[in-house]
Image: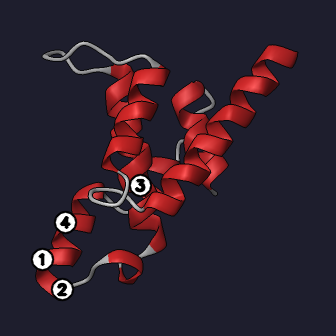
Amino acid sequence: MLTFAVNSCYGRVCPCSRRYFSSPRTVGRLRISRGLKGKEIPLLARITAITDAFEVMVNGRPYKKPFSVEEATVELKKCAGTQFDPELVELFYAVLQEIKEEGEND
């Protein structure tokens, strides 16, 4: 599932991915409204928080220049443990490396 989410950042978009995953804003709401933290936050919400942040960083916004993949990865790692699940950030990075290596071998 994590590979599925990461692939959307590399042009392999599945139209249902955005609808299927919880909004990253849900992570904050769950934490505030229900007092959830860490592993209590649903896995899909924790994954979405990472993939959505990555997508925003590498694609930019009209008011913000995009980061390189390397810069975005560094930012995710800086926020691991505070904003993002550190174990999932490491998995995300591993999957990102796999995708990069597959692209180099094509």
- Displayed quadrant of residue 63: top left
Q: Which residue is mark 1?
A: 32
Which residue: 79% across, 15% down?
104
What is the crowding at mark 1: few (fewer than 14 residues within 10 Å), some, or many (at least 20)?
Answer: few
As measured in the structure, the alpha-carbon distance from the residue carrying label 3 to the one carrying label 2 is 19 Å
Q: Which residue is mark 3?
A: 48
| Closer to us: 56 or 97 | 97
- CB within 8 Å, label 3 to label 2: no
As measured in the structure, the alpha-carbon distance from the residue carrying label 4 to the one carrying label 1 is 6 Å
Amino acid on which the number 2 mark rests in the picture: Gly
As measured in the structure, the alpha-carbon distance from the residue carrying label 2 to the one carrying label 1 is 5 Å
Q: Point out the image quarter for the N terminus.
A: bottom right
Amino acid on which the number 1 mark rests in the picture: Ile
As measured in the structure, the alpha-carbon distance from the residue carrying label 1 to the one carrying label 3 is 18 Å
Q: Secondary structure at mark 2?
A: loop
Which residue: 58% across, 26% down?
10
Q: Which numbered disc, 1 or 3, marks the residue that appears first in the sequence? A: 1
Q: Residue furthest right?
A: 105
